Amino acid sequence: MKRFDDLYLFTRVVEAGGFSAAERATGIPKSRLSRRIAELEVQLGTRLLQRSSHRVSVTPVGEAIYRHARDMADASAAIEALAGAARSEPAGVLRVGTSTLLAETLVAGWLAEFADAHPKLRIELDLSNTYVDLIEQRIDVAIRAATGPLPSRDVVARHLAVSPRVLVASPALLARVGEPDTPAALEDFSCLGQGSLTRSRDWVLHDARGHRRSLPIRPRFASDNIIALREAAIAGLGLAILPQHCCHAALGSGSLRTVLRGWTPEPADLHALYPSRAGVPPSVKALVAFLRERFAAEATMQPLT
């Protein structure tokens, strides 16, 4: 690296026509410039400049080396300009990971809007309903929902929104079996679980007075895909806890109804996750800011406090 720096100083001396002029152009004392060029000549084993008391001239070898050094300096300037642009403008490839549900209901459309605003950016959307290793899967930013601690502490998490969830059932099911009037009564109802039949998540409910009930369920139907749970609930297979943004259309049309009024499921927190705080690309910073704005304006989300 020092030799490269010395070659750059050599180009400045040649272009200025001498050490005094190079001192005025660079602000580097001519004694230091002379010493650095002399050290470069020793390293290369050849004389680059002919010095006299009145003038400095370039040797034939020095002229050839100057042309290569000039090319190196130009390439270095181009690299710095490219890096500077990359630090300030979203560009290149951005790999985004999220769930099928978030992609279908919100994120896919938003990403199209974001890409349209940044023509130098190419976006790849990776869908998975489970948490993945961001580095292993080469995900630049993931958008995930969680009702508890995040699975990994080795990532940066930016809070995007609070996603309300609702306990729902189809009107046909409620007409057939009645409605639960207490959390304990849910044990007598067919329930739909998130996860698997053997490892489904407990249902956690809160009332307006701050009481909390955690209810283990034995689901009749389970899936890690929230859309599948929504469709099973509409079909009357059982009660389900669903994100509001997933089922607001079904609630509006009457194909689903909320049940157990006075009790609400624990909401989920939506986060943007990315691998490191150091050297965060402009594309990631811009996307996180964009998502916070979109989630804040989304009617099915609670505002951040």
Image (cartoon, rainbow, N blue to C red):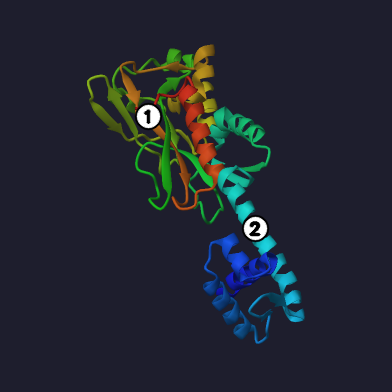
**Quarter of the picture holding the C terminus:** top left
Task: Please state the horizontal and vertical placement of residue 284, each as a whole percent of the image.
Answer: 53, 43
Which quadrant holds residue 43?
A: bottom right
> Where is mark 2, residue-wise?
77
Circle 1 SS class: loop
- Give the residue at the far bottom of this rendering: 45
What residue sits 62% from the left and 65% below the top? 21
Q: Which amino acid does label 2 sit on?
A: Ala
Residue 74 marker = none
Please name whichever residue, 126 or 93, is drawn nearer the observer in this view of the structure: 93
> Where is mark 1, residue-wise?
267
Total numbered labels placed on residues in the image:
2
Look at the picture and state if 95 lies above or below 146. below
Look at the picture and state if 44 lies above or below 158. below
What residue sits 50% from the left and 49% below the top? 280
Look at the picture and state if 199 lies above or below 76. above
**Quarter of the picture holding the N terminus:** bottom right
- For residue 169, side relative to residue 284 (left or right): left
Q: What residue type is labelled 1?
A: Pro
- For residue 31, side relative to residue 16 (left or right): left
Residue density around tag 1, few if under 14, some if 14–19, many if 20 or more, within 10 Å = many
Please name whichever residue, 90 or 270, is drawn nearer the observer in this view of the structure: 90
Task: Please state the horizontal and vertical placement of residue 159, each as a whole percent of the image.
Answer: 41, 36
* Circle nearer the viewer, 1 or 2: 2
**Mark positioned earlier in the residue sequence (1 or 2):** 2
Residue 262 in view: yes
Task: Please state the horizontal and vertical placement of residue 205, each as a whole percent of the image.
Answer: 31, 27
- For residue 38, side relative to residue 47 (left or right): left
